[in-house]
Image: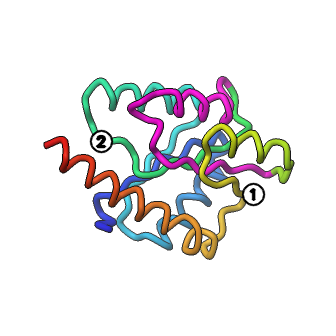
Amino acid sequence: MNRSSASILIVEDNPDHAELIEATIRDCEPGIRILNLKNGEEALEHLTLLKSQSAPTPDLIFMDIKMPRMNGIETLIALKQDIYMRDIPVIMLSTSTNESEMRICLKSGAEIYLAKPLQAETFKQQIRPLLEGWSKAHRKNLNQTI
């Protein structure tokens, strides 16, 4: 994977948590592009703008569950209902280990549900392969449409 061209969107309302997530990702994947947004509403607005410009989507989204304005589950459902965005892998993050919350996230289309804080080993073992798989499939789809 060309890490300098890969991008991750972090949707997290707590600046300390967002900073820790970003630091963990950067430790594991130097050079990756990261954008931080504060809630689901901002994330959908950003992704809709990308869609209107036919711009590339992020390779991966990390999303907190409990956020103001539009929570992570509502945002996940909206993403998965949009043909332009539904294939973007979404990692749901929570300080909770509530099993029913986890089932709702996975049933709604999240690839992985993780308890905060994000650990480097978790990133390397579970998330890096997901990111690499998405990047390869995404490049293949882009090449087929050209």
Q: Quadrant of the N terminus?
A: bottom left
Residue span colored magenta: 69-95
Q: How is the image coloured?
A: rainbow
**Residue appearing at x 54%, y 64% in the figure:** 127
Where, by quadrant of the figure, is residue 51 drawn? top left
**Residue appearing at x 60%, y 52% in the figure:** 111
Structural distance between the alpha carbons of marks 2 and 1: 28 Å
Identity, as a three-letter code, of the amino acid under mark 1: Ala
Between 114 and 130, which is closer to the camera in this rendering?
A: 130
**Residue appearing at x 77%, y 45% in the figure:** 103
Between 110 and 122, which is closer to the camera in this rendering?
A: 110
Q: Position of residue 141 (x, y in %)?
A: 27, 48
Identity, as a three-letter code, of the amino acid under mark 2: Pro
Horizontal arrangement in the rendering, residue 80 relative to residue 31 (left or right): right
Horizontal arrangement in the rendering, residue 127 relative to residue 58 (left or right): right
Q: Is residue 142 magenta?
A: no
Q: Position of residue 47 (x, y in %)?
A: 41, 32
Above or below: residue 38 compared with residue 78 = below
State the residue position of label 2. Answer: 56
Between 12 and 106, which is closer to the camera in this rendering?
A: 106
- Report crowding for label 1: few under 14, some 14 to 19, many 20 or more residues within 10 A (C-alpha): some
Q: Disc number at residue 115?
A: 1
